[in-house]
Image (tube, rainbow, N blue to C red):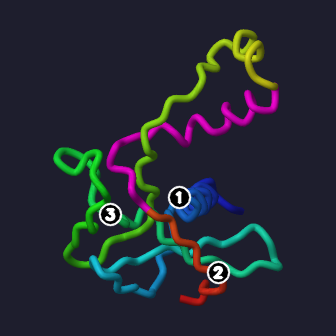
Amino acid sequence: MLTRWPIAFLLFISIVAVRAGPRYSSRIVEIETGAIRGIILELNSRHLEPVEVFRGVPYAAPPVGPLRFRPPAPPLTWPGTRLADTFGSVCPQRYPDITNKTAALQFMPKGRYHYLKKLLPLLVNQSEDCLFLNIYVPGSGGY
């Protein structure tokens, strides 16, 4: 007879495995400003190979302070290996107010309203320090 303890333990292990986080690439890529390590994304298809992703890689110095309204300056260097596992900030932008659906649909099509509703959670992290690249490398999931 099984006791409740092993079942609870297996449930705990399965939850921990799901929340373990991203699978980091074993490959470290050297770029001009330092080293980066990406993550491996397993795609939801048996026909597609995993993709190596480098998120939030800076391509210029933050355009703040004296660099604001100036041409982009070279990115700052960093010591060690930078984990490229999270998206960088989104550039500041104004978007229509869609809190009142009835009022919003008076000046936009229904499709745009639904698109903006899905998009808004991605625009939360806005900053002038937003000069980042997200690099997707197909066929490199073996790293």
Image quadrant where one finds the N terminus: bottom right
Cα distance in 3D space between marks 3 and 2: 25 Å
Tag 3, which secondary structure?
A: loop
Tag 1, which secondary structure?
A: loop
Q: Nearer the viewer, residue 101 or 41?
A: 101
The quarter holding residue 13 reads bottom right
> Which span is picked out in magenta?
110-132
49 sits left or right of 35 in the view: right
Q: Residue at x 60, y 62 (%)?
A: 14
Q: Are marks 1 and 3 in contact (CB under 8 Å)?
A: no
Disc on res. 138: 2
1 sits left or right of 126 in the view: right
| In the image, residue 119 lies in the stretch drawn in magenta | yes
**Amino acid of disc 2:** Pro
Residue 67: percent from the left, percent from the top?
22, 51
| In the image, residue 103 lies in the stretch drawn in magenta | no
Q: Which of marks 1 and 3 is nearer the N terminus?
A: 1
Residue 33: percent from the left, percent from the top?
27, 77
List the single residue furthest toward the left.
66
Q: Which residue is drawn at 58% across and 73% down?
A: 136
59 sits left or right of 48 in the view: left
| 3 vs 2, front mark | 3
Which residue has dot 1 on it? 19
Q: Which of marks 2 and 1 is nearer the N terminus?
A: 1
Q: Nearer the viewer, residue 124 or 45?
A: 124
Q: Name above or below for residue 81 compared with residue 118.
A: below
**Amino acid of disc 3:** Ala
State whether the magenta stretch is mostly helix, strand or loop.
Answer: helix
Disc on res. 60: 3
Category of crowding for the residue at label 1, using alpha-carbon neighbours closer than 10 angstroms: few (below 14), some (14–19), many (at least 20): few
